[in-house]
Amino acid sequence: MITMHKKLALISCWLVLLVGVIQAENKSERPNVLILFLDDLDPDFGCYGNTLVSTPNIDRLSEEGMRFTHAFAAGTVCSPSHTSLFTGCYSSTISCPHHRSTYIDKLPAGYTILTELMAEAGYFTVNFKSNGDYMYNKVYGATAKTDLNFDRGKPENNQESGKEVFDNLHIIDPTNISTYFKGGAWNNKQTDQPFFAYANIETGKKHGFEPGRKWAKEHGIAVDSTKVSVPLFYSDTPEIRQVLASALDAVSHTDVEVGKFLVALDQAGLKENTLVILASDHGATLPRHKQCLWYTGIHVPMIIRWPGKVDANSINTELASIIDIAPTILKATKNDIPRTMQGINLLGNDLKKRDCIFATRDGMNNYFDCSRAVITKDFHYIRHFYPELPFRGNHYASKVLTFPRMLELYENGELNDVQSIYFDSEKAKEELYQLQKEECQVVNLAENPGFEKTLKQFRNKLEKWQKESGDVVLDAREILKMDKVPEGTMVDELLHKQNQ
């Protein structure tokens, strides 16, 4: 006869075993996560319709997963965009929107960073970095760049980043992919512990154009510059055609580096239980792309592969943003999404409820400016709060993001009105474009009386978002006691005067 005490003991043992089984199942169900974050790349891949490049690895990733056609960066330059990636928020909301200008000591109360949330959830968090010299790291493998605008600390693994935010840094040899997912820091991972891994790949940036061109020629796949499509806002010159061809060769070169991670993942037997997210932080290192709120500056590639969970060769046409990546990862790994995160789950039904997204442009390399964009599927609205400041009003734009020949033609008065916009001393106060009819964005409808109602609607959308998101624009004119903000005004100078 079984006594009540024995019955209770048996029930207790059964409950312990059941909890153990449930925990084991939950643990095994949690996927690994790999983010492949590409610096300075447009969606110029074969799967996005570019027929001049060679991107078999990224195209295959798209075939095995979901490709987003309306994905956008939240910022126009590296650090604000990286900040949005890791916080799930617009950088303006957490008071650190300026690039290479000024940082905040810590995130505001209630906000957090994805790496900490994943570590707290029991994930092994790891950042990749290539061995070799500085340029080797820039062009091949991964750079370990996180580049956050808060809690920077001293630079540790990348001179453009602050302290390491991942628990582990893994050194890889890009010439030997067997080093990618084993040895080194991976020895610190517990058996059956899921991982959250991150690879920042800079192969396609400006510094990768020349190596990419050389590599493409050696492999017989260099883009023929005579076949490049020159946008209406560029002059059609041999110099510009060569740069555009080199930029596309760098895209093909980037595909090889992406492929190394995908093949290494497969060879390690990790593919089937790993959620892979590939995206870019903003547009290419070209005029009117990087640092700009035009479509060319913030329309980015985004592909998600998750075997058994995401339909292969599927296309998502809803509006997506960099701020959505963090909450998507948290949802997929069965973690709570903080209420402070402004992004939504890319793999749920929430995207269908979204009618617009936003993007910001602020100080660049300490040179002050401020503009905002509102994007829908049909329209693209841009508000320049300081139109007296030119697009090229910072050193990087005037040197790296400028075609010398176009500048020469501009100074000689030989550019048309559309080509001159990027070089003019002032910007239009507002811009409005009808995307379905005019993706090149050369016809500004903001002064067209027929779109006055639409313009007002976008003004209201922006104003409402700014109030709700806590986007506070510095009143530089009031701070400086000037009707117009002088070109070259420094962000830190404004903040210093404001706090006096």
Image (spheres, grey):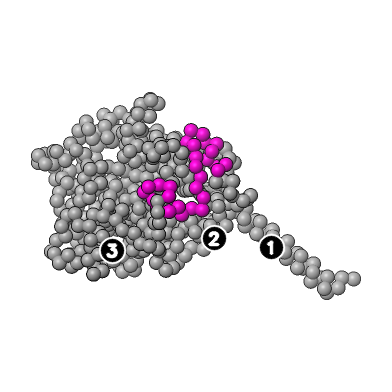
Q: Residue at x 40, y 56 (%)?
A: 153
Dot 3 falls on a residue whose secondary structure is helix
Relative to residue 214, is residue 281 depicted above or below?
below
Query: Looking at the magenta stretch, what is its main secondary structure?
Result: loop
Q: Name the amino acid, label 1.
A: Val
Q: Is residue 30 left or right of residue 325?
A: right
Q: Where, quadrant-wise, is the C terminus in this rendering?
A: bottom left
Dot 2 falls on a residue whose secondary structure is helix
As for residue 178 lying within the magenta part, the answer is yes
Q: Nearer the viewer, mark 3 or mark 1?
A: 1
Asked if disc 3 and disc 2 are in contact, CB closer than 8 Å, the reply is no
Please state the extent of the stretch shown in magenta in the rendering: 156-184
Q: Which residue is mark 2?
A: 120
Residue count near mark 1 (Cα–Cα under 10 Å), binned few <14, some 14–19, many ≥20: few
Res 19 label: 1
Q: Residue at x 46, y 43 (%)?
A: 129
Q: Residue furthest bottom?
A: 4
Q: Which residue is mark 3?
A: 462
Relative to residue 132, is residue 477 depicted above or below?
below
